Amino acid sequence: MSLVRLNIKGISYSQTQNGAYALILSEMDGNRKLPIVIGAFEAQSIAIALEKEIKPPRPLTHDLFKNFADRYEIVVKQVIIHKLVDGVFYSSIICERDALEEIIDARTSDAIALALRFQAPIFTYKNILDKAGIYLKTSTKKKEDSASEEKIIEELIAGEDKESVAKSTEDYTKFTRKELNKMLGEAVANEDYETAAQIRDELSKRGE
């Protein structure tokens, strides 16, 4: 089976369900996107890795794994999303130490959080992308395509366990850039990385 390389497009926050997240992956040489529902902790860990401006004062779990791996000269070479069963994605982390390769099973959200920290490529098999990918045609109907994508993501999140997501999300659209930057600093200082990720997302929308 052929592998397809994926990029991280971003993290989508549900507009109808507070605290619900979907990680959006996109194929490098195509228009399909692969949405994967993830928990709040994994969402904030991935957001921190994507947003270089957010520096946690103490290492998160994935940062600790990276530090541990560096100390013992273990390198994550790549991540492969290799299976999809009943809506659940299964992934493998391909590691190397002393020229010996090991394959470690992992949740997809954890695997991607680590891939970001090791700057390792992310792949999936073509048949998985064919089955679960959202295909958007390149056309003049960009608004319709975007609305269709958002609807699919919302439906995807709606089918997940609500207990695994955060209980509330602030509406950051009403704050000024100055206020958001101050709130961002306070959130990082308080180690509230979920809030920090949401604030960075709002700043990014404004071109920050």
Image: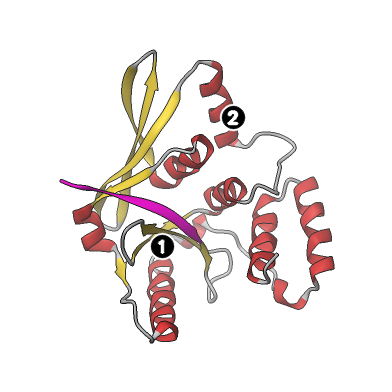
Quadrant the C terminus occupies: bottom right
Q: Is residue 120 left or right of residue 183?
A: left
Find residue 170 and report its horizontal and vertical position in percent: 70, 69
Q: What segment is highlighted magenta in the picture? A: 1-10
Q: Identify the residue position indicated by label 1 in the image.
A: 160
Closer to the camera in the image, 166 or 37: 37
Q: Quadrant of residue 134?
A: bottom left
Please name the residue shown 55% across and 54% down the image. 40
Tell me the CA gap for discs 2 and 1.
28 Å
Q: Dot 1, how many residues are within 10 Å of its Cα: few (below 14), some (14-19), or many (20+)?
A: some
Disc 1 residue type (three-letter)? Glu
In terms of depth relative to the viewer, which is nearer, 149 or 164?
A: 149
Percent x, y of residue 65:
54, 29
**Label 2 close to label 1 by CB (< 8 Å):** no
Residue positioned 65% across, 47% down in the render: 52
Q: Amino acid at mark 2?
A: Leu
Residue indicated by mark 2? 64
Q: Is residue 207 left or right of residue 188?
A: left
Report the side of 173 relative to 113 (left or right): right
Q: Nearer the viewer, mark 2 or mark 1?
A: 2
Q: Secondary structure at mark 2?
A: helix
Q: Indicate the position of residue 178 as horizontal and vertical percent values.
A: 84, 67
Asked if the magenta segment contains residue 191, the reply would be no
Name the residue nearer the viewer: 5 or 41: 5
Residue 51 vertical position relative to residue 171 in the rendered view, above or below: above
- Secondary structure of the residue carrying tag 1 is loop
Quarter-of-image position of residue 102: top left
The image shows residue 103 at horizontal and vertical percentages of 31, 28
What residue is drawn where x is 73% and y is 45%? Answer: 191
Q: Please identify the dominant SS of the magenta region.
A: strand
